[in-house]
Amino acid sequence: MKTALIVLGGPNNNDGSLSVIAKSRCQRAYQIYQANPSVKVLCTGGFGAHFNTTNHAHGEYTKSYLIELGIPESAFLPVALSRFTFEDALLTKPILIAEHITEAILVSSEFHIARVHYVFSHVQPNLELTLVSAKTPLSEIKLAQLYAHERQAMQREEANVLKLLSA
């Protein structure tokens, strides 16, 4: 059984440096990779006003950071140029199918992981999922704001899934 380690994108700064959210996801992914060096790594994130306004895909910044941490370039699959969580699931699907991958370890932040699970389990129902949360080093107030955002975003994702299922 082939396994992918999917690192979901987070914000980066205008100079391409990763936010603490994105770095915490990468650091958690690196820990998982160290214990499972046969996995293929798939980074998500393209371009968007809310997370990456540079000329380089967010997933490329994530990949570079993971290489700096010690993951060899040969371990990486193509970057999924997604703009949001639903696209993460949609755009990783053909990459995983092309590589005959049937199992994925999804890494995201603790405030985001429930939505990741909901979306991926509906968009890729045949993919065996393992969910891993990265602890985000932010204040309780900032985390509360992120959890509130996730509650609103989940409503949008539920509508997206309904459209997908009715198509």
Image (cartoon, grey):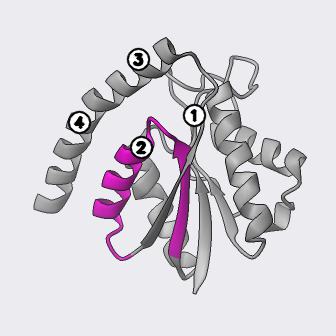
Q: Position of residue 159 (x, y in %)?
A: 17, 43
Judging by the rendered image, the residue that carries numbered circle 1 is 10
Q: Earlier in the sequence, mark 3 or mark 4?
A: 3
Judging by the rendered image, the residue that carries numbered circle 4 is 156
Of residues 14 and 102, the one nearer the viewer is 102
Q: Secondary structure at mark 4?
A: helix
Q: Judge left or right: residue 18 versus residue 118.
A: right
Q: Earlier in the sequence, mark 2 or mark 4?
A: 2
Residue 85: image tag: 2
Q: Alpha carbon of mark 2 to alpha carbon of mark 4: how far? A: 11 Å
Q: Position of residue 132 (x, y in %)?
A: 54, 54
Foreground mark, 3 or 2, reads 3
User: Residue 127 falls in which quadrant of the image?
Assistant: bottom left
The extreme left residue here reads: 166
Q: Earlier in the sequence, mark 1 or mark 3?
A: 1
Q: Earlier in the sequence, mark 2 or mark 1?
A: 1
